[in-house]
Each structure stands twice: as C-alpha cells, then as structure tokens.
Image (spheres, helix red, strand yellow):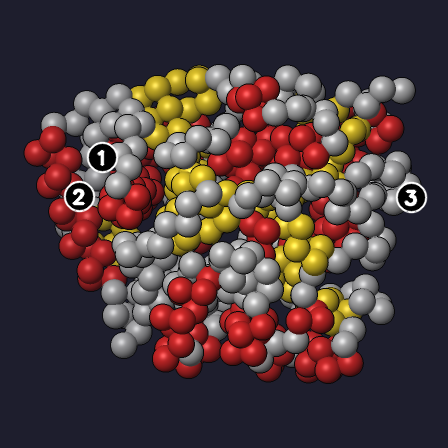
Amino acid sequence: MSRDYIGAIDQGTTSSRFILFDRHGKEVASSQKEHTQIYPRPGWVEHDPGEIWARTDEVIRDTLKKSGISGSQIAAVGITNQRETSLLWDAETGKPLNNAIVWQDTRTAGIVESMKDHHPFLTRKTGLPPATYFSAPKLVWMRDNVAAAASAISRGTARFGTIDSWLVWKLTGGKSHVTDLTNASRTMLIDIQSCTWDRELLSLWGLPEGILPEIRSSIAADPYGTTEADGPFGDEIPIGGILGDQQAALFGQACFAKGSSKNTYGTGCFLLLNTADELIRSSHGLLSTVAYRWKEEPVQYALEGSVAVTGALVQWLRDNLGLIKSSAEVEELARSVDDSGGVYFVPAFSGLFAPHWRSDARGIVAGLTGYARSGHLARAVLEATAFQTREMMEAMEGDSGIRIGSLRVDGGMVRNELLMQFQADILGRPVIRPEITETTALGAAYAAGLSVGFWRSREEIGKHWREDKRWLPVMNPAEREERFHFWKKAVERSKGWLD
C-alpha cells in the first residue's frame, strides 16, 4: 500500500489536533479535543501531561477511523507544539513528576528577578529577555518545589522536555528523548549562535545537562524516532519533523524569504519575521529566535513579537463572564455597536510580553463610562489584539529596518472578519488570509514530508500557498493615530500594578 499522506500532531495550549494532509498540502481528515486548563493559584497555569497524551492518542485514532486511512498509508509524522510549556518525567517509570507548567504561567517571577544581575548576559547569550515565559526558570521552580522532581534529578532519572519531547517519548515507547532547535531556543539554555546546550547557562541556572533532550534539526536528517506498531497509528512511522508552533506557522505560510512575515492569532498572538541566516539582536523588546533548520543546512533565524493573551481573552469573556456562549459569538456581539465607545482592554493577565516585558503589569479596562455596554467590551476585546499587533510590528520594523508591506495572517481568530478589518485599519496596510488558515499543523506536515522526500523543496510547497481574502485599510489616518494614542495610554496604566 502506497504512503500517500503526511500526519501532523498540533498540540496547542487549549487542545490537541491530528490532521492528515495529501501531496497538495490539502487537509484530508482531522480530529480535535480540548484539554483542561488548571489554575491552582492566581497567575499559575498548568496542564496534565497524561491528559495531553491521552487526547493526542484519541485524536490520532479518531482521524484514522473516520477517514478510513491506515497508518501504513502515512509516510511520516510531524509535531508542532506550544513551545515553552515544560515538564519533567521519570525515565524509569515513564510517568510525569509534575503537571506541565504552561508558557503563560507567572509563578517564576521571583526566580527571574533573582537573576537580575545576569539579565544582560542571558539576553546576549540566548537572544531572549529573561521572563517567566521561558523554560529555564520553570525547570528551576520544579527542582526547588517538587520533591519527586528534585529526587529524580539527583538520581539521574529525570527527563526534561517541552511538549514535543514528551509526545515523541510516548509515541516511541520511551526510546527517544529529543527536541528540535526551535523548541530548544526557547529554554534559555542554548547559545543562540552555536545552537547547543550551553554549560555557562546550565551552571548559572544550576541545572544538569543529563536531563536535557538531544537537539535535532527541525527537518530531520534522520528520524526523531519511529512510532510503535501497538500505538495509536498501528504501524511504525518515522517522526520526521518538529517545529514550535509559531515557527511551524511561518513555515506553513511559505515565509522562506528574508523579510517575509506572518502573524498567528491563537491563544496568544505571535508575529515572526524571517531574517534568514542573519541573527538580528533586538533593541525594541523582541526575541531573537531560531526559525528552523533544514537537515545540515545553516540555521535560519527570525525576530519574534509575542503577546500572551488574544484568543484567550475571548475565552475569558465566554468562561469567566458568560457574555457569550461560544467564542464565535464575540463577533456578533461586537457588531451590535459601531465602535468600542472609548473602551480599551489591556489583557495583561500574565504581565505584558513584547515589546514591554513587564511581569508587574495586570489586565485593566480603561475608558469606561455609563454609556458602555457588553458590545463595547466585546469590541474592545477584539481591538486589543489588533493594537498589540501594531506594537509588535513597529518594534520589528525598528529592529530590522525592513518595512512590512502587508501582513499574512493565520490561526483561529482570522475567521473573525471584524477583527481582520480593524487590524488592516490600525496597521494602515493590507492583511491577507490564506486558503489554509491552520498553517501551524501544515508547517509541521511540510517539515515531516521534506525529511522523507515526500516533498522535495521549498519551491514545491510554496506553490501550495493560496490567498483567500485581503482586507485593505479604510480608517482615516487621524483616527488611526488617535485610537493608537489612547491604547498606549491604557497600556501605561497597566504597568507597575504589583509594585
């Protein structure tokens, strides 16, 4: 039986999906299931690694069952994942030593602050501004606060990983402890130039190298491992590609040329600019990160702007306030008014990420009057995403010297046409949605397919990209700047809340 499909596991912040793609990059079948968001304390966010694996197993089996496609027809599997979310497990038992600490979690603020004297060194070495966002302080917290983790580290049986490493471990029956370079670049434990685990960094954080996974290229020269025949695929399939979710979206959007960019609207919002083999150091609050590595080719880099809360704010309206019954209803509620009524919502639930990096910030609603009602709040929620994207774009252009003429967008929120029009208006430039908006999973599929020769080149997969819709700015420039001025005022009022 010929192997005519590529499988992609998309393990995100709120759900796990499995998608099968054909040779034209078209989705053939998929399944998706949410997992529990655990909030033990204010600012703490956890996931159950066992539940994540169970959901991943279920969506693979469900997709194969309803499509009628067997594992023997799949050429390779790719993985994309929420990046900085971190966990430890025991190599002997295969069991997690703690819940995974999610990228949004802020419990490590004290650890980050205690490293204040080393912040310039850390940024120079890793390309990242020290923050609760990244993996190293999470790992330190686990070592210092979870007895089972500390014991396993001292015995040498602990294994650390971001979620990609955990899934490969489970899929291969514990045979492979690996990660790719994009995920490793978010740990604050690699030298961003040599792209290897760094002894100086490990010493500074007080962490042993033995717990870390082997780093491989994103498009693997050799498979990360092979799925077990008695696992969810029912066959031995090479795991050929791994990309952190935002790098996967960049790849899926065919942004291979230097200066090409994309913005993904999911739980958070992430703007990436391809800088090719040039490592650009940010002076505007952005991240210097790995875009991908193709087998043994030179590492490709990117500038990234990361916003913690965008789609999660819509979920908050649904789950915490009950203003809507489903996330899709936010557009209808927002359209019930003509504008935001002067209301601005700064969703600094986990502090402010790019370009501010203020862990002392907290969410605020500004500009409330007796005139405001639920529609104005819904509109302010959507507009917050667009304002934060403009902040990132301005920082990115300042760092790179490259003007972004139009913006390619993807992710779940791009189906919200009110948001997309406001995004074009507040940027003053076109916003372009592709036919395939779930480009994160597609990027992982491309990486896996390229690793085994299912696809041959960037040019081949680049031909699969098709424009679906384009929004052009229609807002008066004076109004655009006035709105952005008030947004920046609201942001300043969110800072220093915990002082």
Q: Which amino acid type corresponds to the residue marked 3 in the rendered image?
A: Asp
**Of pointers 2 and 3, the one earlier in the residue sequence:** 3
Label number found at residue 484: 2
Label number found at residue 110: none
Measured Cα–Cα span from mark 3 to mark 1:
52 Å
Give the side of residue 428 with respect to residue 419, left or right.
Answer: left
Q: Quadrant of residue 190?
A: bottom right
Q: On screen, 164 above or below 154?
A: above
Q: In which quarter of the image is residue 426?
A: top left
Measured Cα–Cα span from mark 2 to mark 3:
55 Å
Q: How crowded is mark 3: few (under 14 residues within 10 Å), some or many (20 or more)?
A: few
Q: Which amino acid type corresponds to the residue marked 1 in the rendered image?
A: Ile
Residue 340 placement (x, y as % from top left): 21, 39
- Quick one: SS at disc 1? helix
Image quadrant where one finds the C terminus: bottom left
Q: Which residue is drawn at 72% across and 51% down?
A: 167
Q: On screen, 288 above or below 205?
A: above
Residue of label 3: 230
Q: Which amino acid type corresponds to the residue marked 2 in the rendered image?
A: Phe
Q: How crowded is mark 2: few (under 14 residues within 10 Å), some or many (20 or more)?
A: some
Give the side of residue 222 with respect to residue 427, left or right.
Answer: right
- Quick one: SS at disc 2? helix
**Of pointers 2 and 1, the one earlier in the residue sequence:** 1
Residue in front for this viewpoint, 48 or 283: 283
Residue of label 1: 426
